Image: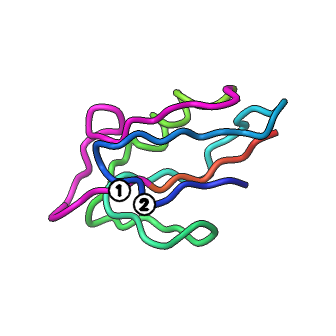
């Protein structure tokens, strides 16, 4: 299991698998104000894009690496009270 956390809005991040492997699944994906760190991430429903995980899955599953643009256009506008900065946390499996 691999992960990236705390990727700030309007940045890009690349999910990468070891040589010869591809992204099998996205185990966690939250854009807004997700909580935690790699290994113990959770959704903060007070500021969360419900479409982030499906967007990441559509872009990345089956790829050896993929780039994600961390913004409303790519991941969906988070609903709720999103005061301050928004971030992306994502966990994925390679095989």
> Magenta residues, as a range?
63-88
Q: Is residue 72 visible?
A: yes
Vertical arrangement, residue 82 with respect to residue 49, above or below: below
How many marks on residues?
2
Label for residue 87?
1
Vertical arrangement, residue 93 with respect to residue 69, above or below: below
Q: Which residue is located at x 84 percent, y 30 percent?
A: 20
| Applied colour scheme | rainbow
Kindly check if marks 1 and 2 are in contact, taking CB atoms under 8 A apart as contact.
yes
Horizontal side of 64 relative to 13 (left or right) equals: right
Is 49 part of what is drawn in magenta?
Answer: no
Foreground residue among 6 and 57: 6
Q: Quadrant of the C terminus?
A: top right
Q: Position of residue 57 (x, y in %)?
A: 55, 35
Label for residue 6?
2
Q: Position of residue 79 (x, y in %)?
A: 23, 53
Q: Earlier in the sequence, mark 1 or mark 2?
A: 2
Q: Position of residue 47 (x, y in %)?
A: 27, 61
Q: Which residue is located at x 59 percent, y 66 percent?
A: 38
């Amino acid at each position: 299991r691999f992960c990236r956390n705390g990727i700030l809005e309007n940045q890009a991040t690349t999910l990468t698998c070891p040589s010869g492997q591809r992204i099998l699944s996205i185990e966690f994906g939250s854009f807004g104000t997700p909580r935690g760190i790699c290994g113990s991430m959770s959704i903060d429903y007070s500021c969360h894009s419900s479409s982030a995980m499906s967007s990441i899955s559509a872009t990345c599953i089956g790829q050896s690496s993929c780039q994600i643009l961390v913004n409303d256009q790519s991941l969906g506008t988070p609903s709720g009270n999103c005061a301050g900065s928004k971030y992306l946390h994502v966990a994925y499996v390679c095989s």
